[in-house]
Amino acid sequence: MELGDIKNLDKLKIELSVNPRNPHTISGLGGNAGEFLFLLENQVVSEEVPSIEEAGFVKENNSIVAKFVTGSDESNKEKHFKFMRSSLTEFIKSKYPIFAEFHKDFSFDQLITKVMSAPSMGETTLLQEAILIASDLKKSLDAKNELCKQLDIVFNNEKEVFIAEFCRAVNCPIETFYSERGLWNKKFEAHMSGDSVLGPKYHGMQKRHEQIWNLILSEDDLEKLQELENYPPHIKIFTARTIIGIDTVVRFNLDERAEISIPL
């Protein structure tokens, strides 16, 4: 799933759900726990309007309406989302002053505590369910982390042995395969993997490593990952980032197994 496939209101919720210091949101303003909670707790209707003069958050017939500009192109998207963020802030202050005051310095830790202790309304119940699933998955993955560290060592050792064998075969110094920072030199590694004799052996080793990695996750892990897939994008992404953690998502390639990691 690409960010462009997600509705504007969900994009706004995703943006609000990240760290306040995250500069990579559409608006560039980072996240806001209090305003994220507001959108979770309240039923908001999303509409499209032709111009920014008509856009913003309003209350119509006792309903909260978020009016986004139709078909905003990439050059104007930052401007429009900054406007919608400002409009949301002012809307909450003017229409829900008690909420605005109480959640002025609200943190995501406080949000999680509140949701887990007593989900009140709207999507907070969904978020509570997703947090419980993600917490169980994180506990299972943490238990497998030491195994992953050992596999990293084993796989790197096997790769170094293979590179030494290739260097002897073509009579070149092993230092050729390392950059100044001690990383694999991708250019020479490509030559090695394309070798008519050792190339197939190298690819076989890579395939074996990949198969072992794929077997680390249990059926229960995969089922929990699939359960998270069923939640709205802002909820599954929030739980992936805050409960499971980005490092764990990357370590176990969870973003390739499920659509839980969407760059802003």
Image (tube, rainbow, N blue to C red):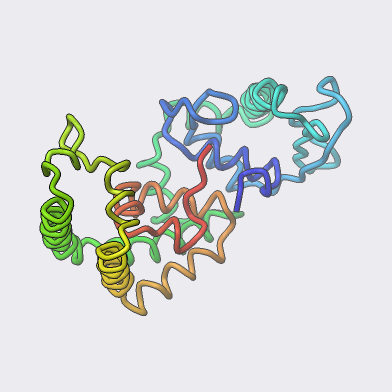
Q: Quadrant of residue 77?
A: top right
Give x and y (percent) for residue 20. 43, 28
Viewer-nearest residue: 130 or 138: 138
Residue found at x 80% / y 27%: 55
**Number of marks:** 0
Residue found at x 77% / y 39%: 65
Residue found at x 40% / y 66%: 133
As drawn, is 117 to the left or to the right of 182? right
Residue found at x 13% / y 48%: 171
Say if 243 sits above or below 17 in the image.
below
Give x and y (percent) for residue 149. 15, 57
Viewer-nearest residue: 192 or 171: 171
Q: Quadrant of residue 81?
A: top right
Identity of the residue furthest to the bottom in this view: 219
Q: Quadrant of residue 200?
A: bottom left
Give x and y (percent) for residue 208. 27, 71
Image quadrant in which the N terminus is located: bottom right
Say if 82 sits above or below 225 in the image.
above
As drawn, is 11 to the left or to the right of 128? right
As drawn, is 199 to the left or to the right of 56? left
Give x and y (percent) for residue 177. 19, 42
